[in-house]
Image: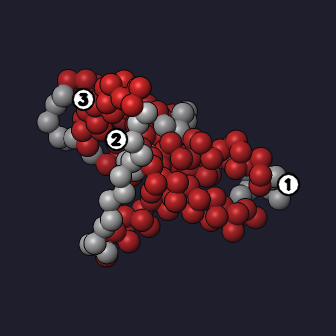
Amino acid sequence: MADIDTQDMYDEHAKPVYRYLLGLCGNHYDAEELTAETFYRALQSIERYNGECKLQTWLFQIAKHVWYHELEKRKRNTVSIEVAEPLADPANLEEAVASKQSKIELYRRMQKLNELTREVIYLRLSGELSFKEIGEILGKTENWARVTFYRGKERMKSNDEPE
């Protein structure tokens, strides 16, 4: 499938890929870097995209592998540099703090879930993917993705202990 306009590909899919990676890594700067790496790798292997799945699904698979590679790198390199998020506009500081607190609570609850359940939730919410696409990315069935999402969501609501 060589007739893909790479600029259109980026314009259409960069934000969902970024949101997915942001959900995985939790850091704006890392998510930007990982998104760039995802599209770099996609361009390197565009001739291998055969159209059997949606282009976005293919890109999410690449993003998942980029994230796994990043995790391996982090394991090898124990020294990490934390980059602070930019400060919010003082006029909207109270709103920004409240929003950040609810995001932090959501991420805390998500961290209590197992890795696959977290990934299903990230793909569904950040990537806005269908359960079928999530199943394709993770090598599972559509029904598995649907049930895993529902159970994870229920666990988060009930604030259960980790799986």
Residue positioned 43% across, 33% down in the render: 89
Instruction: Tell me where residue 96 sits by quadrant.
Output: top left
Q: Is residue 6 left or right of residue 114?
A: right
Q: Residues within 10 Å of mark 2 (few under 14, many from 20)?
A: many
Q: Where in the figure is residue 18, as x and y percent of width and height? A: 54, 47
Marks 2 and 3: CB-CB under 8 Å? Answer: yes
Q: Is residue 20 left or right of residue 155?
A: right
Instruction: Tell me where residue 114 sits by quadrant.
Output: top left
Q: CA distance from mark 1 to mark 2?
A: 35 Å
Evaluate whether residue 93 shows in this view. yes
- The residue under label 3 is which amino acid type? Arg
Kind of element beneath mark 2: helix
Quadrant position of the N terminus in the picture: bottom right
Query: Is 21 or 99 nearer to us in this picture?
Result: 99
Q: CA distance from mark 1 to mark 3?
A: 44 Å
- The residue under label 2 is which amino acid type? Thr
Q: Which mark is residue 3?
A: 1
Kind of element beneath mark 3: helix
Q: CA distance from mark 2 to mark 3?
A: 10 Å
Q: Which mark is residue 155?
A: 3
For marks 1 and 2, the one nearer the N-term is: 1
Residue positioned 25% across, 23% down in the render: 157
Above/below status of 100 relative to 115: above
Query: Is 50 or 123 nearer to us in this picture?
Result: 123
- The residue under label 1 is which amino acid type? Asp
Above/below status of 23 relative to 6: above
Residue found at the far bottom of this picture: 76
Q: Residues within 10 Å of mark 3 (few under 14, many from 20)?
A: some
Q: Which residue is mark 2?
A: 117
Residue positioned 81% across, 53% down in the render: 4
Q: Where in the figure is residue 27, as x and y percent of width and height? A: 40, 50
